[in-house]
Image: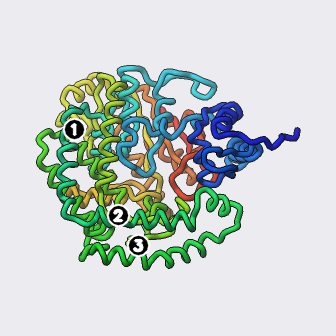
Amino acid sequence: MMVTDELLTIKEASEWATKYTRKTVTSSNISYLIQYGRIKKIGNNGTTQVSKQDMMNYYESYNEQREVSWKDQLGSDLNWALSFDQYKEAETTKHVHRLHPYKGKFIPQLVEYFLDNHIDDFKTETYFQKGDIVLDPFSGSGTTMVQACELEMNAISIDVSAFNALIGNCKVIKYDLIDVQNVVNRISKALKIFLANSHTLEFETKLLQELSKFNNKYFPVPDYKYRLRQGEINEVKYGAEKEQEFLPVYNKLVQEYNINLRQNKAGNFLDKWYSQHIREEIEFVFDEIKKIKNTDTTKIISVILSRTIRSCRATTHADLATLVEPVTTAYYCAKHGKMCKPLFSILKWWETYSKDTIKRLAQFDKLRTKTFQTCLTGDSRTIDIIAELKKKNPAFAELVEKQKIKGIFSSPPYVGLIDYHEQHAYAYDLFGFERKDDLEIGPLFKGQTKEAKQSYIQGISDVLNNCKKNLVDNYDIFLVANDKYNMYPTIAENAGMKIVNQFKRPVLNRTEKDKGAYSEIIFHFKSE
């Protein structure tokens, strides 16, 4: 049936798309599609319209066809319900889950699915109840622990990385939010006074003004991105030309405001990836943190600083997760389709993340339950869970000894994929945590050789054998993995367990640049 190409306002497009997709599509979502060239803008500001046919083409290609295409590529056993595609990003990164970036974490809805008491066509029985104790021996950013708290379950997490343990524990600590806010206010005020004698903020303001004029002229929104998507512009060539054209303007401002683009040393991560101005601000705030008397407040303020400095590295927006080489000049940004700049002060992100963190902690306070949650720092292959727990929380240790752990929900590291210490190298440099890179299982530097895979199998097997000492007899273990090397059947055998079920799910929102069809399996282990 032929569809007439009628024009819709943004509000009308939002209402149409909500009906068409059977999911909430806001006016902001439609504006995003226009801004990033997914659909063409018709009309001028104030009377913006879009083509209904454009909308239909976009949603047909993006949603309906994607499920069919992915099942063709990955198999008809792909459980699309476990894609959780009905959730917006704000829901998959709700409350404390976005206190700090972390590469390779799973979404909270996946944890909820297996921990809560619902059943469906795929999950035909419940595995955990309120009051149970859940273990995550590969804590990462602490997602399992947070969701257990929401569901009125106790949780123990373990991570070999001291910084990961800090992130996880900071998500579940019960704070004096008034004290946290007062400390944030004090440090923000002190930082502004510190910057008063600097030309950094003046420089950034002037630079932004020049970039705005330049971008409005050469990268108009949304026309430029639409032309890119239509193949009318060679992005690499055009971007490089405009970088060179803007360079004299940039260099003149750097000289005028006496900006130090690099530090005079490059010994560690903080030396290499930050301008001199930002490094001085980082050290200033860190010195202010040392004055805090409340230990819990110190921890969460440290996480705010860590999140801030991660966003202030001298790199392009497209390379934040990978890091190629330090960038010290304005550059063409493929992510935003315009000229962007590195950062020269932490003030903006410090204030933004401070406000965001306090808001997220307050949101979680309304959902948390009176249960135990603790993340231990240690090697899950050898750690004595009870002994370490007694040092941190004797009452929780007593409960574990009496009740035992009902099961595990965890996402072990993938073999040869992520360097879990290096992704937070700046935090190790600043806070002085001892790095334990040599204790990582399946680290990036070992690659995916036959020897690396054998070492990985042994490592995960050792973790399960160590942890099951504290599990109930009829335990349930769920491990999330992309097992393309078919290692998990051997791991189960080595641990004296059997795989009783597998749940294959599509992974839709990956942070990597490769957005191709990708799945992972949730393996359900039980005792033999």
Q: Contact (CB < 8 A) between labels 3 and 2?
A: no
207 w.r.t. 249: above or below: above
Query: Which circle, 3 or 1, is nearer the viewer?
Result: 3
Q: Contact (CB < 8 A) between labels 1 and 2?
A: no
Locate residue 371 relative to residue 125 in the image: left or right.
Answer: left
Residue type (three-letter) at the residue carrying disc 2: Glu
Q: Contact (CB < 8 A) between labels 3 and 1?
A: no
Locate residue 206 relative to residue 394 in the image: left or right.
Answer: right
Name the residue nearer the viewer: 523 or 92.
92
Q: Which residue is mark 3?
A: 329
Query: Which circle, 3 or 2, is nearer the viewer?
Result: 2
Callout 1: SS = helix
Q: Which residue: 47% across, 63% down? A: 212
The first of marks 3 and 2 along the sequence is 2
Q: What distance separates the C-alpha of mark 3 from that of mark 1?
A: 36 Å
Locate residue 473 relative to residue 57 in the image: left or right.
Answer: left
Q: Which residue is mark 2?
A: 204
303 w.r.t. 85: above or below: below
Callout 2: SS = helix
Name the residue nearer the viewer: 336 or 142.
336
Instruction: Determine which of the numbered discs, if any, sits on residue 180 in the image.
Output: 1
Measured from the top left, where is residue 380 in percent x and y? 32, 45
Callout 3: SS = loop
The first of marks 3 and 1 along the sequence is 1
Measured from the top left, where is residue 267 in percent x and y? 25, 72
**Can you say which quadrant of the picture contains the N terminus?**
top right
Observer able to see residue 300:
yes
